[in-house]
Image: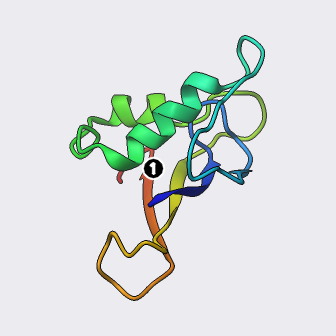
Amino acid sequence: MYIKQVIIQGFRSYKDQTIVEPFSPRHNVIVGRNGSGKSNFFFAIQFVLSDEFSHMRPEERQQLLHEGTGPRVVSAFVEIIFDNSDNRIPIEREEVSLRRAIGAKRD
């Protein structure tokens, strides 16, 4: 099992929908200039996979939403699509998708 695709929208530095693919089943490297969103990319993965974001106050939720220029972002989501061809998750699907969404007032 490995990450096949990551989709991020409205989360921290990712205002517009961003699709990151393809990923290798073996090794992957994320590179970029300072301020290009590398840390936020890994934080987005943690946001989906960790339970530490289950109970957040409104001000904590607001910190996860994009705060750049233009119209205000009121919701965000991160979706991770896993390759399940090895059937590690025992369901009859080649892909498994996990998605977490958050809004300014609720998640």
55 left or right of 33 in image: left
Q: Is residue 82 left or right of residue 106?
A: right
Query: Which quadrant of the view contains residue 39?
Result: top right
Q: Nearer the viewer, residue 83 or 6?
A: 83
**Total numbered badges shown on the rendered structure:** 1
Please state which of residues 26 and 91 is positioned toward the viewer in this rendering: 26
Residue at image point 35% right, 48% down: 49
Q: Residue furthest bottom?
A: 92
Q: Residue furthest top?
A: 34
Q: Which residue sits at x=33%, y=84%?
A: 91
Q: Residue at x 62, y 37 (%)?
A: 28
Task: Give x and y (percent) for residue 65.
Answer: 53, 37
- The amino acid marked with disc number 1 is Gly
Q: Where is the C terminus found, in terms of image quarters?
A: bottom left
- Which image quarter is the N terminus in? bottom left
Residue 105 appears in the rendering: no
> Where residue 36 sits in the image (x, y, percent)?
73, 22
| Snapshot quadrant of residue 98 | bottom left
Check disc 1 and report its element: helix, strand or loop. strand
**Residue depicted at 40% across the width and 41% down the height:** 47
Above or below, 33 against 58 in this view is above
Q: Which residue is mark 1?
A: 103
Q: Position of residue 21 (x, y in %)?
A: 71, 53
Which is nearer the eye, 8 or 72?
8
- Badge 1 density bin: few <14, some 14–19, many ≥20, Cα 10 Å: some
Q: Is residue 107 above or below residue 31?
A: below
Query: Foreground residue, 18 or 93?
Result: 93
